[in-house]
Amino acid sequence: MENKSCYIYTRVSTSMQVDGYSLDAQKDKLRKYAEFQDLEVKGEYCDEGKLGKSVEGRIEFQRMLEDIRSLKDNVDYVLVFKLSRFGRNAADVLNSLQIMQDFGTNLICVEDGIDSSKDSGKLMISVLSAVAEIERENILVQTMEGRKQKAREGKWNGGFAPYGYKLVNGELEIAEDEAEAIRLIFDLYANTDMGANYTAKYLETHNIRKKPRQNGKYPYFTAHLIIKIIDNPVYNGKIAYGRRKTEKVKGTRNEYKQVRSDDYLLVEGIHKAIIDDKLWDKAQRKHKSQVKKYEVVDRLKNQQKHLLSGMIKCPICGAGMYGNKSSKRKKDGTKYKDYYFYGCKHRKLINGHRCTYNKQINEEVLNDAVIEIVTKLVRNKKLLESMKEKIDSKINTTDIDIEIENFQKQLRQLNMSKINLLDDIGALDPEDKHYKAMKSDLNDRLYSIYDKIEDINDLLEEAYATKQTIEKDKITSDNIYEILTNFDVFYQRMNKVEQRKFIELLIDEIQIYKERQPNGQWIKSIKFKLPLLEETLGTYLDKNSQDETVVLMSKVNPTK
C-alpha cells in the first residue's frame, strides 16, 4: 500500500460509549492501522450520535461520499473500525460501496479484517450486511416478545403511568390525588345520561383539572381523553398488550406506523383496580352503544320536537329534564291534541337515592320564556360587542400548540435513541466477556423506549384532538354571534331541528323553581356556553312583576 492515501470514518451513537467502541478508541486504532500500512490520511469524518439505520441521516458520511465523487483527494481507501460503523442497512452499505468503487476508492473494515479491493472482500461485505439487517429485525421481534411476556405476568409494560396511577419500583400504584377524578368520570359517564362531551364540561364547570405531569401539562379533561379513560382496562385492574401494532408504511424502506388492533392480550394485572367490575361493565355497555350510534340517533329522533331537553335541570336532583308527549283519548278512542311537557325521569342518582320530583311542565311555557330572555339580551348592542371581544380572547391555542411541539420533539429524540440502541445491540461483539450483560442492559433501555414512544403517540393524538376542539369552538362561537346579531330574523326562519341545534350551542343549562312563581315564572336562571359577560344580568319576564330572573352569563365555572 505504498504511496496510497485514505479517509478515516468513525461513528458512534450517543447511547454507546463503552470501551472499544468510543470515538477516541475507533480513531486511535484507525490511525495506527493507517500508519502501519503506510497510508496517508487525507481527511477524517465523524458522525456522533447520528442514526445508523440509514446513511441519509449522517451528514459527515454524505460529505465524505461527495469528496470521493469530486476526487478531491483521490483517496484509495476509506478506513472504518467495523462494518457496522459504515452502515447497518444492507442496501445502503452496498450502494455506498458501489459509489466509492466507481471512483476508485475501496473500503477496509479494520476490526473485521475486510478489504473490498480483494476478491472475497465485497462478498463478505454483502453477507455481513444482510446478516446484520436480519439480526436487527430479530432484535425487534425479541424485544416485542419480552414486552408481551411481561404483560402475560400482569406487569406494567413501562413508560408513563396512566393518569390515576404512579410508578413505584416499576409497578403501578394508585395515586389518590388523581384517582378521585377517574372515579368521578366513570360515575358520571355510567350513571347519568352524560356522554364524553358533557362529562368533560361537567369537570370544567366544577373546576376539576388534571394535575400537571411530565407527560402532559394541559389542565383540562377533554372529551377525547374521557373516551380514552373509559376505554382503558388498566382502571379495571387489567393489563392489555397489543391494542396497537406497528406496520411498515407501504412504499418505504424504513418507515413504520401504528395501527389499532382488535386482537390483543388482556390479563389480570398485579396492580389494584380503581374501578370495580360492576361500574366498569356498565361504562363499557354505554360506550359500545354510543359507538354503534343507535342511541344517539334514537335520542335525536325523539328530542327534535323538544327544544330544551336535557338543558333544563331538575330542581330536586339536578339531572336533565326531558321532553315527553302525552295524548289523551276520548271514550270512543279518538285522540285529543298531543300535550308536550318536560319532566324528570326519576333516574337513580349517583348517591343511590331516587328523585321524587314529578311535575310535568308545559313545554310551550318554558320554550317561550327562554326565547324571550335571549331576544331581550341580543337587543343590547353593548352586550353583543362585549361578547365578541370575549369570544376572540377566550379562543387561544398557544398552550396546546406548545404541548404539541414538546411531544413532537420528544418523539424525535426517542426515535433517534431507539435506532441508535438497535445499532448498538447489533454492533456488540459476542466474544466480549461482558457481551450478555451489555446486551441485557441495552435491551432493557430499548424496551423502555418503545413504551415511551407509544405513550407520547397517545398524548400527541390527544393534543391534536384538543386543538381541533378549541378551533371548532372558535368557529361555533363566531357562527352563534352572527346569528345572535340578527336573532329575530334567523330564529323564526329555522325549522325545529335547526332551532334545537342552535339552542344546544348557546345554552349550557337552565335552572327552574320547584313550583311556578306567583307571576307565572318557572325559570330561575340560565347559564350560557358563550363567554358573554362575567357578571349577572337581570331580565324581567313579566313587566308588571318585580320578580327578577337572573341570567348567568359567565362560561360554566361558578362554584355551585
Image: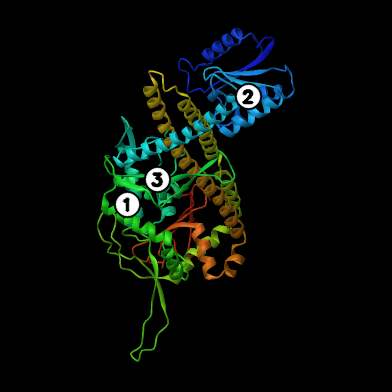
Q: Is residue 249 left or right of residue 164?
A: right
Residue 206 visible, this orientation: yes
Residue labelled with disc 1: 187
Q: Amino acid at mark 3?
A: Gly
Q: Work out how far the residue at label 1 is from the one at label 3, CA to CA, in angstroms.
A: 28 Å
Q: Earlier in the sequence, mark 1 or mark 2?
A: 2
Crowding at label 3, few (<14), some or many (≥20) Cα neighbours within 10 Å? some
Q: In this rendering, is residue 83 above or below 265?
A: above
Q: In this rendering, is residue 478 above or below 114?
A: below
Q: Nearer the viewer, residue 119 or 556?
A: 119
Residue at 53% across / 25% down in the picture? 84
Residue at 57% across / 40% down in the picture? 253
Q: Work out how far the residue at label 1 is from the one at label 2, CA to CA, in angstroms.
A: 58 Å
Residue labelled with disc 2: 61
Q: Earlier in the sequence, mark 1 or mark 3?
A: 1
Q: Quadrant of the N terminus?
A: top right
Q: Nearer the viewer, mark 3 or mark 2?
A: 2
Disc 1 vs disc 3: Cβ atoms closer than 8 Å?
Answer: no
Q: Is residue 108 left or right of residue 298?
A: right
Q: What secondary structure is marked by label 2?
A: helix
Percent across and percent down for residue 106 are: 64, 22
- As drawn, the label of residue 260 is none
Q: Earlier in the sequence, mark 3 or mark 2?
A: 2
Percent across and percent down for residue 523 are: 42, 62
Percent across and percent down for residue 426 are: 47, 27
Q: Nearer the viewer, residue 527 or 447?
A: 447
Residue labelled with disc 3: 242
